Image (tube, rainbow, N blue to C red):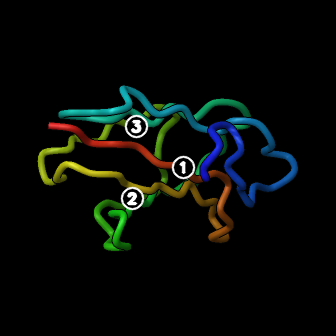
Amino acid sequence: MYSYGQESRSVAPEMQGKFVKTYPNPATSYITFDLQNNYQKGLTIVVYSFLGKKMYESQNVSEKTTLTLSDFNRGVYIYHITDQSGKVMDSGKFQVSR
């Protein structure tokens, strides 16, 4: 059974707390990644389908990045925010509903 608010994450200790806000969620035509505290240059966003297919990747993202979802089907997607060394700083999921 899944309990909301108890996701386990491997996040660097200095990044504890929510690093990125995604909205709107569920999304229909776009999703915004709003990088919160401790933003640093050189971050990469990678989005995967629930089946593991890489759908999107953007390097050196700004503090607020909007992704157009025209090539995304309805479903759940997973994102990873990584630093320049490839270390995952945050991860999460969002839903596309049409």
For mark 1, what is the residue? 92
Residue 7 in picture, x, y percent from top left: 67, 49
For mark 2, what is the residue? 47
Viewer-closest of 57 and 95: 95
Identify the amino acid type marked 3: Thr
Identify the amino acid type marked 2: Val
Sequence order check: which comes first, mark 3 or mark 1? 3
Q: Would you place residue 34 above or below residue 60 in this image?
A: above
Q: What is the distance, in whole Å, between disc 3 and disc 1 at their CAs? A: 15 Å
Viewer-closest of 35 and 11: 11
Can you tell which mark lies on residue 65? 3
Badge 2 element = strand
Quarter of image, res 66: top left
Q: What is the distance, in whole Å, between disc 2 and disc 3 at their CAs? A: 13 Å
Residue 34 in picture, x, y percent from top left: 50, 31
Badge 3 element = strand
